[in-house]
Amino acid sequence: MGALRLYDYLESGNGYKVRLLLTQLGLPFERVEVDILQGQTRTPAFLALNPNGRIPVLRLEDGTHLAESNAIQWYLAEGTRYLPEDRRGRAEVLRWMFFEQYSHEPFIAVLRFWSFAGTLADRPPAEIEAKRAAGHAALAVLERRLADAPFLVGDRYGIADIALFAYTHVAGEGGFDLAPYPGVLAWIDRVRAQPDHVAIDAPTGVAVDLDEAGL
Amino acid sequence: MGALRLYDYLESGNGYKVRLLLTQLGLPFERVEVDILQGQTRTPAFLALNPNGRIPVLRLEDGTHLAESNAIQWYLAEGTRYLPEDRRGRAEVLRWMFFEQYSHEPFIAVLRFWSFAGTLADRPPAEIEAKRAAGHAALAVLERRLADAPFLVGDRYGIADIALFAYTHVAGEGGFDLAPYPGVLAWIDRVRAQPDHVAIDAPTGVAVDLDEAGL
């Protein structure tokens, strides 16, 4: 069986979800930094791993490649404390993970990415304003749950929390003020206090360079 | 145990996913048509069912409400022939369902919705063009899989196919020409040929009106 290998980008919250979970599960893994700003996810070699041209991708023990951060999380968390066993709880984990990809990430992560990539000023103000409003709507949905619940599903930390934490805790880097969301802020502290937590900018895993990875 | 009740909107591909699966599973259900164009998903009564203000929502047997079309599909398909039993296959189903919500629906479904709602002409041409390009990129990813595979995961029809079929087969209503994607077209025919298939505009289920549903 081969080593787990994560194709990743350090600033990516989607990559961070997998990095954090692998670390909390105590699973050793290799990490390949792929520079998405330099087109390294759009080369033929990368597209053979994920035709959708995005990180994260995880090479599994059997040598196959799995794409989509939340699908990878589900795969890794199966049978562990990070995913409930009951059918209703599992469905609620997916509810939050699909919410994250459809109603949260495209606004909160994208404004952060544009700030980071230096392209924010090139965008039409109406587009930025629409993303800002949609991002706040997503934060309000999170607040409604977290105002009186410790975690997103049941009373235990798990992959739904990791999925939403990834971009929420750095929302400020995209200009979102979290002060109106005290439940969210308290939850961020609870997530950070979990055993084996690592920060988004911590390059965990064993570094493998692009050449070595054949990319 | 109460009846399954689907809060739905007939033109919605996201609602259709659940409608189609319920029908193919042979599960009786009530259906409440909620007019998203009239703000009926943004009332306090609806937001109590789904704080994110979107259909579909399924009221389960225990009276709780589950949001997000693909989470609902997963819940319903668990233990049936529409979801594989092996860990790798299940992860691949999620991979396609997250691809659908992040890389497919926001482009292919949204252009259809704008056409349908009559707001396409109000949008900046650059925004439409960007969504058009991203939609074709998603179709190309589907084609790459379906050019030589009968279904999205393994060799059996399941909820990943339903998730992607919902908006792909009506992509033409948003101005997408599917002729360059012969594998996708053949797959559409295979999906339509499945037992108990129903069309997107077939109001299956037992109609319950908004008042009766307390909305």
Image (tube, coloured by chain):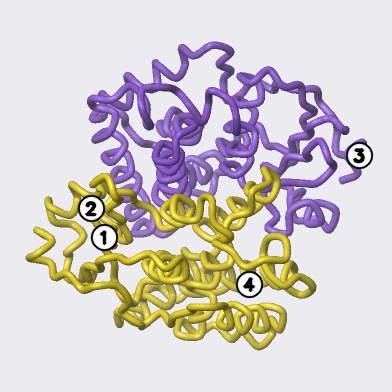
Chain colours: A purple, B yellow
Query: How far, Cα to Cα, is label 3 from label 1?
Result: 54 Å
Same-chain check, marks 4 and 1: yes
Residue appearing at x 60%, y 25% in the figure: A20
Q: Secondary structure at mark 2?
A: loop
Residue type, mark 1 in image: Arg
Query: How far, Cα to Cα, is label 4 from label 3?
Result: 30 Å
Could you tell me which chain the residue with mark 1 belongs to?
Answer: B
Q: Is residue A166 visible?
A: no
Q: Secondary structure at mark 1?
A: strand
Query: Residue B2, which numbered label?
Result: 2
For label 3, the residue is A211
Query: How far, Cα to Cα, is label 4 from label 1?
Result: 32 Å
At which x and y percent is residue A176? 35, 36
Report crowding for label 1: few under 14, some 14 to 19, many 20 or more residues within 10 A (C-alpha).
many
For label 4, the residue is B139
Q: Quadrant of residue A150?
A: top left
At which x and y percent is residue A91? 43, 44
